[in-house]
Image (tube, rainbow, N blue to C red):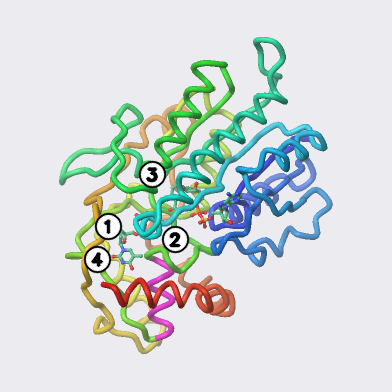
Amino acid sequence: MKTYLITGGAGFIGSNFIQYIFNKSREKILVINIDKLTYAGNLDNLRSVESLENYKFIKGDICDAEILQEIFENFDIDCIVNFAAESHVDRSIEDPSIFIKTNILGTQTLLDISKKYWKINDDFREGKKFIQISTDEVYGSLGKEGYFTEKTSIDPHSPYSASKASADLIVKSYYDTYKMPINITRCSNNYGPYQFPEKLIPLIINNCLNERYIPVYGDGKNIRDWLHVEDHCRAIDLVINKGVIGEVYNIGGNNEKENVQIVKYIISVLKNKGLSVSEELIRYVEDRKGHDRRYAIDSTKIKENLGFKPSLSFEDGMLKTLEWYLNNKMWLDKVGSGDYMNYYEKFYNKR
Ligand code: NAD
Ligand code: TYD
């Protein structure tokens, strides 16, 4: 029986990952999910697993050493997958402080507690692993040419990416200093079910369904590389089971798209499905401060060393995603209302 401590498991990628590992091996695992339930955390994402005997949810903050200590006292944790983070670039520009606290101090608190329980003299107990879920944004921005490899220098531009880069360096330092068994994964932009509608793809879908303008920052030609969340989960699972200790793995979709291309694509698919939406909803608005122009990932290492390659094409992944949001309109209406609408209206009124 392998015991996982998943942090931030009520968020977008964390909740997909918990469902993924239960689908893969229902009986042989115990999953403890610690989540602070910020605006981005939602227990509705985990309805399919909440009644399983080998799943346990704990509401808590990764900055809280006492609660983490209690978890390690009660469970012999084998693998930590650290998804917990403040994850939205625009919010980090408005107010960086919580990003520094959760993303940097929270990660260091988790590392310290796991070191305390996993280290015996100079060695770590067999079979333990700390997986830091990071992002390609730590590498900064590319021009028209080139790709990020694991050797690319870290050069973050937003408070969000700077906090993730800081956490990566602290995780690496625990490997370099204590030989702590770690891996760091750096993935490109994810899309798929349960993504909070402040992020580009669910925002476009939500605004189309509610006939709201779709704000496109700057000239709309910024490029991101997109990967379906299911493929990201599979890559993380490979890193957990086969990743060489101490290594960083980039994970990409080989799907570079301009933002405005994504907006137009979603509008056209929804139109084909009979919805009355049009490109007239597009509004070019003031650009994001420090907006990275292009992200593109070289995934050679994870492909050649761990055998990972994305299984869903962008078209199939998008179709699946759009169908999920159309079939789960109640989920979208619930998370995309209340506090979020206050944030959204205030944010866009300023632009
Ligand atoms: P998300 O914002 O949807 O979810 C974050 C989760 O963490 C939420 O459930 C929130 O309640 C929880 N959380 C926040 N602060 C916490 C704290 N102090 N203690 C415990 N829980 C806390 O984010 P996501 O998109 O699922 O991203 C998950 C991870 O993947 C993040 O570390 C992010 O940097 C990384 N990542 C995301 C993407 C992407 O495209 N979304 C791409 C690459 C990497
Ligand atoms: P986002 O989903 O916030 O992810 P990230 O900044 O982590 O890549 O944004 C993706 C891209 O879409 C980014 O270039 C900013 C742009 N964007 C818009 O043009 N309009 C929007 O309303 C949002 C949320 C993002």
Nearest the viewer among 275 and 204 is 204
Where is mark 1, residue-wise?
Answer: 257
Is residue 349 part of the magenta span, yes or no? no
Q: Is residue 163 left or right of residue 239?
A: left
Is disc 4 surrounded by few (<14), some (14 to 19) or many (20+) residues within 10 Å? Answer: some
Q: Are marks 4 and 3 in contact (CB under 8 Å)?
A: no
N-terminal label among 4 and 3: 4
Image location of residue 168, percent across then percent down = 45, 33
Where is mark 3, residue-wise?
Answer: 252
Of badges 1 and 2, the one in the foreground is: 1
Q: Which residues are magenta?
A: 201-210
CA gap, disc 3 to disc 2? Answer: 14 Å
- In the image, residue 292 sits, relative to residue 308, either above or below, namely below
Circle 1 sits in a helix, a strand or a loop, which is it?
strand
Circle 3 sits in a helix, a strand or a loop, which is it?
loop
Where is mark 4, residue-wise?
Answer: 217
Circle number at residue 317: 2
N-terminal label among 3 and 2: 3
Identified at 51% across, 45% down, the residue is 101
Q: Are marks 1 and 4 in contact (CB under 8 Å)?
A: no
Q: Is residue 272 left or right of residue 174?
A: left
Nearest the viewer among 27 and 175 is 175
Of badges 4 and 3, the one in the foreground is: 4
Is disc 1 surrounded by few (<14), some (14 to 19) or many (20+) residues within 10 Å? Answer: some
N-terminal label among 3 and 1: 3
